[in-house]
Amino acid sequence: MDRLIGVDVGGTRTRVGAVYAGRILARRAFPTRGLAEVKAAIKEVLLEAGWKKPDAIGVGAPAPMDMRRGVILNAPNLPHWNGANVAEELQDAFDCPVFLGNDANCAAVGELVYGWRAQDFLYVTWSTGIGGGIVAGGQVVWGATGQAGEIGHITLRPDGPHCRCGKRGCLEAFAGGAGLSDRSLEHFGQRFSAEELVERAKKGETGALSLVDDACFFMGQALAIVAELLEPEMVIFGGGLTNSWDFLGPKVIAALHSMSRIRPRVELTKLGDDVGLLGAATLPFHFPKL
Ligand SMILES: [Zn+2]
């Protein structure tokens, strides 16, 4: 089983690749829509790679799911994927086994197999939302139904801002791109994107700086909770907001160190934007027994 298709469904972009021995032989990236677009992209990369059919397909998506059946449940951030029967549809179309997993857990698999190759680490996706994946003793910690590692929904302030998950004061509500943008609206009466907010903070604008400092503080607090609990060797970050890592990283690390006696090495992913795609392609080998 070595002709693998990886599908990384992002909140804004979807990446599809034909992966052989850790190399992406053919790839497509496009604004996220639904399964039809993914099927079309798989057909294209198969053709380009010169494969008749893949040996397996792995799909990572940022949505609640039934991993056992390969079905996406309610997906507020992915309207075209609500209730999508990913495994059945792709299996029918490409006549091979299909595996569906949480996107951040897939990225953790990517890091485990092709990235830093640490054996005990937390992977954090820091973008519109915040996702996490745990690897302990060289194994992905999936949890009872595959939802483990949701660092974004650790409650840090029970009376904090509303989170998209329905709770209040989650890490994601403070530090996720969408959460930061919501907070800019509350504070300035004007909505800025998280990237704009970070740029303003870099220039020293007090209001923006205080929101960004808060985000980094809460990120550090969540990492400290995980560090004390699991003693990871590393924390590995990926995702759009890490484009400003030079500015954000030192703040996050300072907060982590102020709240945890255990101080894992904190690094960016070695795989860049491909971490989710490579991880999804390797998901068939790391899929849990559910
Ligand atoms: Zn939440």
Image (cartoon, grey):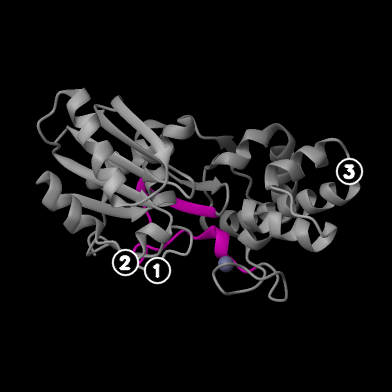
Residue 15, label in figure? none
- Label 2 secondary element: loop
- Label 3 secondary element: loop
Q: Position of residue 162 (x, y in %)?
A: 66, 71
Q: Earlier in the sequence, mark 1 or mark 2?
A: 1
On screen, 272 above or below 282?
A: above
Looking at the image, how many numbered discs can be counted on the residues?
A: 3
On screen, 245 above or below 87?
A: above
Residue 205, label in figure? 3
Do residues under tags 3 and 1 come within 8 Å of each other at their CB atoms? no
Task: Give the labeled residue for mark 1.
Answer: 74
Do residues under tags 1 and 2 come within 8 Å of each other at their CB atoms? yes
Q: Is residue 283 left or right of residue 128?
A: left
State the extent of the magenta-drawn residues as a range: 130-155
Mark 1 is on which residue type? Asn
Mark 3 is on which residue type? Glu
Q: CA distance from mark 3 to mark 1?
A: 38 Å
Q: In the rendered image, is residue 135 in sight?
A: no
Q: Nearer the viewer, residue 238 or 41?
A: 41
Q: CA distance from mark 1 to mark 2?
A: 6 Å
